Amino acid sequence: MISLLQLTASDLKEQIINKLMIDRGIEVSEATGKDVYYALTSVVNEKITPQWFQTDKKYKSQNNKQVYYLSMEFLIGRLLESNLLNCGILDVTNVVLEELGFNPSEIYAAEHDAGLGNGGLGRLAACFLDSLASLNYPGHGYGIRYRYGLFEQRIIHGNQVELPDYWLKDPYPWETRNEKEAVVIQFHGDVHMFKRNDGTLEFKYENTDKVMAVPYDIPILGYENEVVNTLRLWSAEAVFQDNKGKSIGENKEFYRDLDHQHSIEQISGFLYPDDSSHEGRELRLKQQYFLVSSSIQNIIKYYKKTNRKSLSHLPEKVVVQINDTHPSLAIPEMMRILMDEERFSWDAAWKVTTNVFAYTNHTTLSEALETWPKDMLQNLLPRIYMIIEEINERFCKDIWLHHEELQHKVHEMAIIADDRVHMARLAIVGSFSINGVARIHTDILKKQEMKTFYSLFPERFNNKTNGITHRRWLLQANPELAKLITDVIGPQWIKRPKQLISLLKYSNDRSLLEKFDQVKHENKNALSNYIYQQTGILIDNQSIFDVQIKRLHEYKRQLLNIFHVIYLYNELKENPNQDLTPRTFIFGAKAAPSYHMAKEVIKLINTVASIVNYDKDIRGKLKVIFLENYNVSLAEKIIPAADISEQISTASKEASGTGNMKMMMNGALTLGTLDGANIEINDLVGNQNMFIFGLTSDQVLNYYQNGGYNARDIYNTDDRIRRILDQLNQGEFGIHDIEFKDIYYNILYHNDPYFVLKDFEPYLEAHELAERAYRDRATWMNMSVTNIAYSGKFSSDQTIQEYATDIWKIKRG
Ligand code: 26V
């Protein structure tokens, strides 16, 4: 077998041609992009399969501790190009495709994005898998194979319209159905308790609803190291009763069965599209238990197959990271299996469980904190509920007996309180590690949101600042920049991204800075072509590309951004000759379908765009582009072209952010608040290399606690703001004059909960500074290269290294 690294262009070409002939019965000249896509995936798969097998075998024989990343979301995007990159044949493939008469990016675009996630949390999971494999760690993902991913967004008359994302319409070439590994999941039913002869208790379940969980495995390739880990996604299926040969007409049960089958398949039917407000839907709870029960059963089965020692040694071989509270039922599920199936005592089971689980918190927004009505949980999962009750009782009793100082806090710490089950509390009590995702976020958890728990378990809390895979977000998304960097500092940075720091030596080399400028310019050209093709709008390539791409949420303050645009527009209308560097404001954002205010903001951005983009008075100095259906693949197009990265959340609200890191790594300068990982970017590059503005998180928290902010005062005293709000209120931008009134009311009657008005003036000043800096190309490019140089710290390789040594205690394979 030839190694991939040795694959020559002519070998590859021959293989593609053969595949087209054998699998499809066509010649290259007849092949569509999709045909070539499938031929290529099949070539790659043939190479991956033996390495996958070898990796499995190696892990079995080494029998080292493995980490399992449990997540309701994996936002992986497309895989062909990154798989080619990781097996070291991306460049040769690009050459071959060109030679065969195809545009490589069109071939890669034939793959439907796997959009099995909402935003940051899901994308982080995907970056982590890439880093685990690339660092040669035995680490795998467990998730759900949703038949529908995050909805596809269309903008119609300025409004968001959601369409189903049926990403499995065409066969997905990276997955392998693995029926042998299917497991049964049980819902509902009755629990019976018996006393065994030895006095221990036995629990039996009757009349449960059984669902099959069938795994589909996706290979996760390490970068040029022949490691192939696994992402295992579970699909829900019914076990059909035997029809005893009856035809449909005779079989009265048939339609009932069909209905039943349909309701079971719903469990892996679609991804819930809300990313920050918790709604207690029963189907979502079913999904969560479906994920954790199948995964924990699978983990235990594997342990028993590969270890002779009893399950009390499980923590020596297994660590499970739970991605937010969504999979925290894994804790009682582990207890259930150990006690009811493996005959462990409570104490022995608890000891194992609390040494296996580690929990990551991704948000402090109170509306995102998951709680479930206890009746719902009890009815759906009676045995699990009993176990949670007991965890809760023992925990509360422990406080009562041993922590006098916390006795008055029992109610706010109890896992079951006010008829609800509090998932974060369950996760904290049942895990040995609790981490936030950026320094400030972890500090806020310790000092505010989880203060009482921190006082009880200080040793459990730790920080792990997020990261992004530089392979996808720099090497793959921005090959020209990657090449230039390698030309300057050599290729070592690819395996050791912190070595990007060597670029600093060159950050004053003018001729080199020009080359960086040139690359950015080409990326901007490519994006403006794409924009033209998508929207018919021509944008000025010399303008500043000012980018805000992320989920739409009030705390992320896209509203502040569009207010700034309106302000600039108003100024230009008054004085069209103003000396203003042309700007293009680029937005990409999906709103949760039921999030009214977020949808209003989308509508406002599109309405402002439709006015500004066609107003001849302002002489093309401003353009506003809202790119629909923001997803991983679109991010890969936009990020390399960004000049300014808008990271403008209300301080204290953005746990970390990862778009900030992606844009920094691609040479954009951050314009942002001191929030999330922006603070750590600031620590590295300093105020002179980014544009910081606005309230600090202490100031925000202080306002929330003590009051003292009055939005109306600002409205009354700042003409620019009053003008904008009045324009909204008077329907100047709306077709109906009631449009955008909700925004107006929210600011003036609900006292601007996200401090948009308070931060408006400092935001303008930050923009003015940025505009001035942009005019001096050498200075700007020096800042840009400085950002790239420091960005290695945010490679997810670094983050994973920290998880591996501090939390997981795992060794490289
Ligand atoms: C919450 C919910 C609520 C119930 C319905 C489904 C659902 C799905 C996801 C979430 C939580 C999303 C939290 C999230 O994405 N947080 C982001 O995590 C990023 C990675 O750590 C971080 O960079 C962002 O700052 C943080 O907002």
Image (cartoon, rainbow, N blue to C red):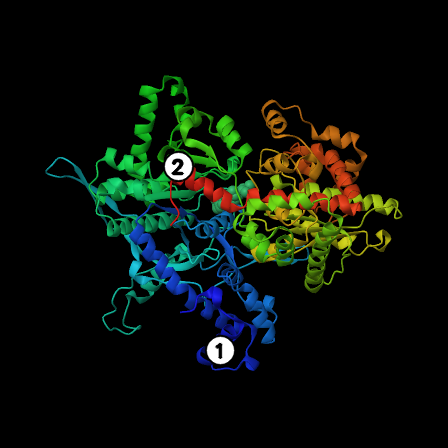
Tag of residue 20: 1
Total number of numbered labels? 2
Distance from label 2 to label 1 (Cα)?
51 Å
- The reply to whether residue 690 is visible in this rendering is no
Q: Residues within 10 Å of mark 2 (few under 14, many from 20)?
A: many
Tag of residue 660: none
Q: Give the x, y percent position of residue 418.
A: 40, 31
Question: Which residue is painted at 24% across and 43% down in the image?
Answer: 311
Q: Nearest the camera: 331 or 128? A: 128
Q: Give the x, y percent position of residue 566.
A: 77, 45
Q: Could you say whether the residue bearing mark 1 is in a helix, strand or loop?
A: helix
Q: Residues within 10 Å of mark 1 (few under 14, many from 20)?
A: many
Q: Nearest the camera: 94 or 653? A: 94
> Which residue type carries mark 2?
Ala
Furthest residue toward left: 197
- The reply to whether residue 8 is visible in this rendering is yes
Question: Which residue is painted at 63% across and 26% down in the image?
Answer: 699
Q: Nearest the camera: 92 or 150? A: 92
The earlier-in-sequence mark between 2 and 1 is 1
Q: Find disc 2 in the rendering and name its residue.
A: 427
Which numbered mark, 2 or 1, is in the foreground of this view? 1
Quick check: 552 left or right of 203? right
Q: Give the x, y percent position of residue 749.
A: 67, 33
Q: Could you say whether the residue bearing mark 2 is in a helix, strand or loop?
A: helix
